[in-house]
Image (cartoon, rainbow, N blue to C red):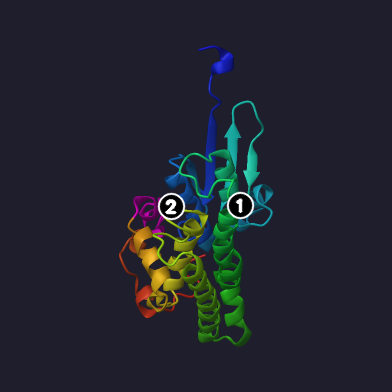
Amino acid sequence: MSPSEHPTKTTYHLYTFYASSCAARLRIAFNLKNLSYTPHYRDMGKKDHESDEYRKMNPSASIPTLVIETEGKEPFTIGQSVAILEYLEELHPTQTPLLPPPSDPEARSRVRELMYIVSSDIFPPTNSRIAQMVKGMRGEREDAITFVKTIMTRGFTAYEALLSTYFPNARYSAGEEITLADVVLIPQVEQARFYGVNFAQWPLLNGVITRLEELDAFKQAGWRSQGDTPEEDRVSVTREEERGNGLGAKA
């Protein structure tokens, strides 16, 4: 093989935390696309992501961050999960495509519509940082739990409505193939369960969730199965989940 024919080597470095739902999105996508990555664990409970060193890499001080090292190039860093998902899709479009083909912009926009219900409408106001701020207004834990469950319920109700209108008989969120909508959905579902959200009220969504959670790519990306998961959390159901009041339990 001549030097010009030698394949370029790319290494992915994922800065992750076992309980970060945004990091879980990427773990799922890497699994689905059969791409390997090197995990670098940052303990959000200890605020490792707020260190000066980490902020130099990700000024938002958020998890995850992806650093791409390609032979012959300067390292490339991305610090927002949805941007990383779309980057991976554009770079590896034929490895388990997570968007419909560019020739079908309507279908692509529908996938993004579902994805943004989760990533824009549900997640930002319900992450643990915001929940703690709501709790701090009166010092009442129930205020935050009610707030979070209200936001989640509205978002998942909208998701169910779109499924009912456009994909009433589909296996997954946007049809018979897994898409980016599914990739962001399951980590948000796991977070919602900590607050006692009951998905039985959305039958189409609940069916999609059940089918997705049977897949290895989703199982292996789950928060209980990561290299930095504390041993006491490697159980099927935690006390917080049983109570349905897991304020701050997942990022």
Mark 2 or mark 1, which is nearer the start of the sequence? Answer: 1
Q: Looking at the image, how many numbered discs can be counted on the residues?
A: 2
Q: CA distance from mark 1 to mark 2?
A: 16 Å
**Residue type, mark 1 in image:** Pro
Q: Which residues are magenta?
A: 215-229
Q: Secondary structure at mark 1?
A: helix
**Which numbered tag is attached to residue 177?**
2
Residue 64 painted magenta = no
**Residue type, mark 2 in image:** Glu
Residue 194 lies in quadrant: bottom left
Is the residue 167 above or below the residue 42 in the image? Answer: below
Q: Position of residue 199 (x, y in %)?
A: 40, 74
Crowding near the residue tagged with mark 1, few <14, some 14–19, many ≥20 C-alpha atoms within 10 Å:
few
State the residue at coordinates (43%, 67%).
Answer: 168
Q: Which residue is mark 1?
A: 105
State the residue at coordinates (35%, 64%).
Answer: 210
Q: Position of residue 193 (x, y in %)?
A: 42, 72
* Left or right: 62 in relation to 232: right
Residue in the foreground of this view, choosing between 42 and 152 = 152
Q: Position of residue 142 (x, y in %)?
A: 51, 86
User: Furthest residue to the top?
Assistant: 2
Residue 35 visible, this orientation: yes
